[in-house]
Image: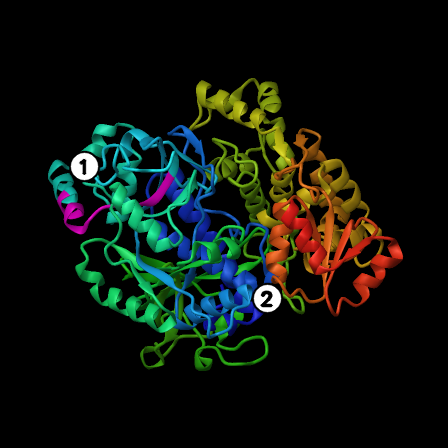
Amino acid sequence: MPASEEIRNMNEVEASAELARLAAALARASSAYHSDDSPEISDAEFDALFERNKEIESIFPHLKRPDSPSDRIGAAASDTFAKVTHSVRMLSLANAFREDDVRNFEETIRRYLKLDDGTPIGYTCEPKIDGLSLSLRYESGRLRQAATRGDGRIGENVTANARTIGDIPDIARRAPEVMEVRGEVYMGHSDFERINARATLEGSRTFANPRNAAAGSLRQLDPDVTRSRPLRFYAYGWGELSEPLGRTQYEALQRLSDMGFATNPLTRLCDGLDDMLAHYSGIEARRATLGYDIDGVVYKVNDLELQRRLGFRTTTPRWAISHKFPAEMAWTRLRAIDIQVGRTGALSPVARLTPVTVGGVVVSNATLHNEDYISGLDACGNPIRDGKDIRVGDWVRIYRAGDVIPKVADVDLGRRPERAKRFDFPTVCPECGSQAVREEGDAVRRCTGGIACPAQAMERLKHFVSRAAFDIEGLGAKQLEMFYRDEVLGIREPADIFTLAQRDAASGGKLRDREGFGERSVRNLFQAIEERRRISLNRLIFSLGIRHVGESASRLLATHYGSWEIFEKRIGSAKAGEGPEWEDLVAVDGVGQVMATSLVAAFSQKMERGSIDRLVKHLDVRDMEPTVNSDSPLAGRTVVFTGTLNGMTRAEAKARAESLGAKVSGSVSARTDLVVAGPGSGSKAGKAHELGVMVIDENAWMELVTKA
């Protein structure tokens, strides 16, 4: 999705600080929902924050954080329920917050499909329900399985609970042999009020909002509890199908309705941008009277053949977008400015506020981005908020970006206390006392203490055990902080985790006597650690917490190198800017100079490399398995596209090649198998001829992929 105007106007300082705030907010929200079973924000709010992160990264790819959540969908399924692998991934949606975003969405579709402005594109427009995504699998017309979205690949089996929802038919009339219906479970306003009123009378726990009530009710271990909760369901899409439901999105929804599924009556066909925005305004005006929560309107390309051509990004379809309703704002007093130190040493200022309700959520903290944002001037001296600085004691206007992230939008200078002083941003780390420097071109000030800084060491450990990394059950932030301070069983680096049981045995098994532990919990922890000694290559790379190497990049690297032995050998011997290992690294499509430099630096630093080597000694690293059909003639081959393609865009060609098992590279080398050259191919085609690499034109390419 094209970036919003706000994000296009960001500088690097603002973007980096915002990415740090987004990553922290997502981690906090995920922990509250999945670990503590006490959601702080709605699913829709989580998705808005998630998509905002991706939007900023699209403009500032070199600022992408190692702990970036941009390639995640939802969150990992809970161990409370049996797990279900979705036959077709359940993706999230890209978000739009302004009319320009929707306009950019349609323009991007036209560019991708090479359609001029005169060619009509129809869209379905429907309210975006603020509930819980659910996939229903029908076989021979009967409901066989219901699963939550989870992380998009694996969800929770809630079949028994789904059967208690009246809007979900047990038998779908005239359904295909295999059909996965997808939609949203929600709770109406009046039902929500009744449930909370009854809970108050009984002295039991109340729900924060209808979305949490719906999610909590569907994820009950006892289906009778779910049955007692008035849950509803709207169908809006599908996954695996043994036969098409129609030629268009709208026809397919009508067929689902004929089968007995509830579909939203406010869904309508729109002929173009103006019609879409008019329908959005109409739904927004009726929002308070609908009787259930919505947080925007979803636009989908109506023609299913165009949907197929547009395809998918890593986590979102190109043919759909969620147009969010505007964020709300409120004024409150800034009580203090605290400095937090992150895993990469970044010093991030946080505003401590007099609590205020913004968009239905009580906000007491907000991001202040960095020292430039506080001073009111960016790194180039350009004004931020008309050049107003931010001081403790100020009255500030807070808004939740995308209805999620608390940010300071403005300062009321007329209410500023007379003795308020300018904030002096620290030049030493508040955690370890090391110098905090801001290098030229860097967006933030960073502690120079490295792994000697306890804040950085702790954050690295937290990243190491995070869900997308080693995901060690029973070893969360609280336990890591306890072990980090422990003189006998101290965990200072990842390798220490895998010697914990041995060191505990040498100490006489003292861990079982610690607060929060016992025989069973210690046994379970050691077992969980043992289970993680065998780890996939992409997870290991991501777990190292190397700056700029996120989850998606880790998968790219793992796919390219295949095994830890090859990865470690080539990265360890690479020299920044020169040599075959470096050229091979930067040729990986999606790996830029900044990321490559960070990787090489991590493996060349003595302390960092020592920590990695000590860790790997305790592991069994699984090679990256191919995820595509090995029968494809392109499987395992490296392809380079150069010049102009007329029949499809470069993005569509790349997606097609990867779907057939090829690796798409950005440069030609001795490892290249095939070059597809269009007009204006230039030096790449010339180099291919020099190296004896096969070069074909676009027509030959189209014939090749058609046969595949």
Relative vertical location of residue 28 with respect to residue 411 in this rendering, above or below: above
Q: Is residue 634 above or below residue 169?
A: below
Q: Which residues are magenta?
A: 180-194
The picture quadrant where one finds residue 169 is top left
Q: Which residue is more in the foreground, 480 or 140?
A: 140
Q: Position of residue 243 (x, y in %)?
A: 42, 41
Amino acid beneath label 2: Ala
Which quadrant would the C terminus be assigned to in this image?
Answer: top right
Q: Is residue 217 left or right of residue 323?
A: left
Q: Which residue is mark 1?
A: 204
Magenta-drawn stretch contains 190:
yes
**Residue at mark 2:** 443
Which mark is drawn over residue 580? none
Could you say which is closer to the camera, residue 420 or residue 7? 7
The amino acid on which the numbered mark 1 sits, given as a three-letter code, is: Ser
Percent coordinates x, y for residue 214 in the rendering: 26, 43
Circle nearer the N terminus (2, 1):
1
Magenta highlight on residue 692: no
Q: How many marks?
A: 2
Rendered image quadrant of residue 461: top right
- Write down the quadrant of residue 444 in the picture: bottom right
Report x, y in % for residue 293: 25, 54
Front-most of 429 and 38? 38
| Residue sitting at x 54%, y 75% | 378
